[in-house]
Image (spheres, rainbow, N blue to C red):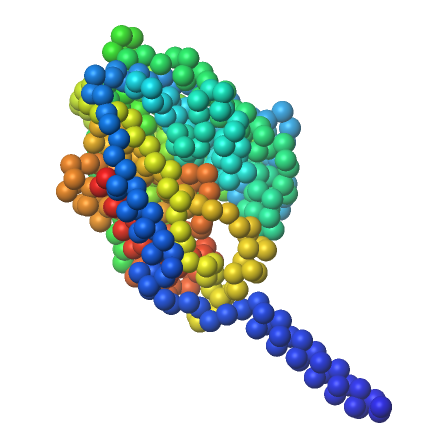
């Protein structure tokens, strides 16, 4: 064979190889509406079965609540999550302490633990341990409500996949064990401190604290501060669970010390001011939302955010009326069915599911619903957009309920944004939109049904 023929033959083989590789790795972006997918059909069947389940409640059962916090600092260093711009470097100190905060709610024979950790997310490597970790204590993933503050300057190394290491740094099996151990200890301490309690709820408007970081003034903003108040009737001690939609991203790639970001300063200010005895923050519908920028100086910006939220609470917290619990505790952990991974790498092209799973891992995700009186805590496995909250709040009001929506509940499915922005070539709507299109309206519909039960 001549040299020219060999070159031509090699070129043809390489061309066929790369064509085959392209076909094997990429597909046409799937625009099928969610209501026409198998995922939707399975989800609605599951919802129907949940709707047909009726529990009996004893209104005479006394609600008891306890709380505790445990420091999250490990006895070793880790990369910082998010790691994308930090190059895998480990933290070199502690700017401000990071914690796991826990509540235990008990009524009759039922109990539920509420967890918020100063972490980017609660990773599945941690939450899955609770299938068995606390069985002897009466807790598992069916009655633990996981949330995170979503600080971007906490410990990493907790997820063992290629993309997981991009976000959280090189995996270290000690980290999930450490986090799970801290959560377990916080739950046990909180349960040991339970006392008869009353609860109340309030929502309060804010100004110049949160923006729509995706589309600016073209979009809407969830500017409401949501507060769940707890008062121990014998001791008189008070606690608050607070959610808000501004991302905890003031400290970012230049911060090489651990920090709980502005939510950490917020809870410290609240406790130092004696407004509450114990404060807990959980990230709300932070997708598409960011803190209102007033200073390029990160320390000044942290103070602005924490102080701004604290002032709203100082004006409103004492007005939240606490009342006895009238119904038993109710918590559902419901599997969330999704279409096959559909991550776009172009306007009309997406990765095939096998490639996505190779890069990102393959895990089931769930919705959490913990109901106390007429307040429904809803835990989502994502950065859930604040632009979706108006319809959820409106639907809940029709059933005389209020929703405290949180993210990062022990699994992760990327960003869930409003359907109208699906075609935008932006980080949230393309790079991190893994199961679209219409994942926003799909989760809205599923959450509304779950809350209504």
What residue is at 32 percent from the left and 50 percent from the top?
45
Asked if residue 200 shows in the view, the reply is no
- At horizontal 21% and vertical 31% (from top left) the residue drawn is 374
Residue 69: percent from left, percent from top? 44, 20
Q: Residue furthest top?
A: 234
Q: How many marks?
A: 0
Task: Locate residue 393, reporting x and y percent.
Answer: 21, 43
Of the 4 image quadrants, the one containing the C terminus is top left
Q: Nearer the viewer, residue 88 or 140?
A: 140
Name the one closer to the observer, 192 or 87. 192
Instruction: Please tell me whether residue 352 is drawn above or below residue 228 in the rendered image.
Output: below
The residue closer to the viewer here, 43 or 84, is: 43
The answer to whether 253 is drawn above or below residue 344 in the figure is above
Is residue 176 shown to the viewer in this render?
Answer: yes
Report x, y in % for residue 98: 49, 27
The residue lying toward the viewer, choosing from 284 and 111, is 111
Q: Quadrant of the N terminus?
A: bottom right
Q: Residue at x 49, y 24 (%)?
A: 135
In the displayed structure, would residue 17 be above or below residue 320? below
Residue 238 location, quadrant: top left
Q: Residue visible at 62% across and 71% down? A: 21
Figure quadrant of residue 365: top left
**Residue 248 vertical placement versus 358 (above, below):** above
Q: Is residue 35 left or right of residue 362?
A: left
Q: Report x, y in % for residue 271.
A: 36, 19
448 to the left or right of 87: left
């Amino acid at each position: 064979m001549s040299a020219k023929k060999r070159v031509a033959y090699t070129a043809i083989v390489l061309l066929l190889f790369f064509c085959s590789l392209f076909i094997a790795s990429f597909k046409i972006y799937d625009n099928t509406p969610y209501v026409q997918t198998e995922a939707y059909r399975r989800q609605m069947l599951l919802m129907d079965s949940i709707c047909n389940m009726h529990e009996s409640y004893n209104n005479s059962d006394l609600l008891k609540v306890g709380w505790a916090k445990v420091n999250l600092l490990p006895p070793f260093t880790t990369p910082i999550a998010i790691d994308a711009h930090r190059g895998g470097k480990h933290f070199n100190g502690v700017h401000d302490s990071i914690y796991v905060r826990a509540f235990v709610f008990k009524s009759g024979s039922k109990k539920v633990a509420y967890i918020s950790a100063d972490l980017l997310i609660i990773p599945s490597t941690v939450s899955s341990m609770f299938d068995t970790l606390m069985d002897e204590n009466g807790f598992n993933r069916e009655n633990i409500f996981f949330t995170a503050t979503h600080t971007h300057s906490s410990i990493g190394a907790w997820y063992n996949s290629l993309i997981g290491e991009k976000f959280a740094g090189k995996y270290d099996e000690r980290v999930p064990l450490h986090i799970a151990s801290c959560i377990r200890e916080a739950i046990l301490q909180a349960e040991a401190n339970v006392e008869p309690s009353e609860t109340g709820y309030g929502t309060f408007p804010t100004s110049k604290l949160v923006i729509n970081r995706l589309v600016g003034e073209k979009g809407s903003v969830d500017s409401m501060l949501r507060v769940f108040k707890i008062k121990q009737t014998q001791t008189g001690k008070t606690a608050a669970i607070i959610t808000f939609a501004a991302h905890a991203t003031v400290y970012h790639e230049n911060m090489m010390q651990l920090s709980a970001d502005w939510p950490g300063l917020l809870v410290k200010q609240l406790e130092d001011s004696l407004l509450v005895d114990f404060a807990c923050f959980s990230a709300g519908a932070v997708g598409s939302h960011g803190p209102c920028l007033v200073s390029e100086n990160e320390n000044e910006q942290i103070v602005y955010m924490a102080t701004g939220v604290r002032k709203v609470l100082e004006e409103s917290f004492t007005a939240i009326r606490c009342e006895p619990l009238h119904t038993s505790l109710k918590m559902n952990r419901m599997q969330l069915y999704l279409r096959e991974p559909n991550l776009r790498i172009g306007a009309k092209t997406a990765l095939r599911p096998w490639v996505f799973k190779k890069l990102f891992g393959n895990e089931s995700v769930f919705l959490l619903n913990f109901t106390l009186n007429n307040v429904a805590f809803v835990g989502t496995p994502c950065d859930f957009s604040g632009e979706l909250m108006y319809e959820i709040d409106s639907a809940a009001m029709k059933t005389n309920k209020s929703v405290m929506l949180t993210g990062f509940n022990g699994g992760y499915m990327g960003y869930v944004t409003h359907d109208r922005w699906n075609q935008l070539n932006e980080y949230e709507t393309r790079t991190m939109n893994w199961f679209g299109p219409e994942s926003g309206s799909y989760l809205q519909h599923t959450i509304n049904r779950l809350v209504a039960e």
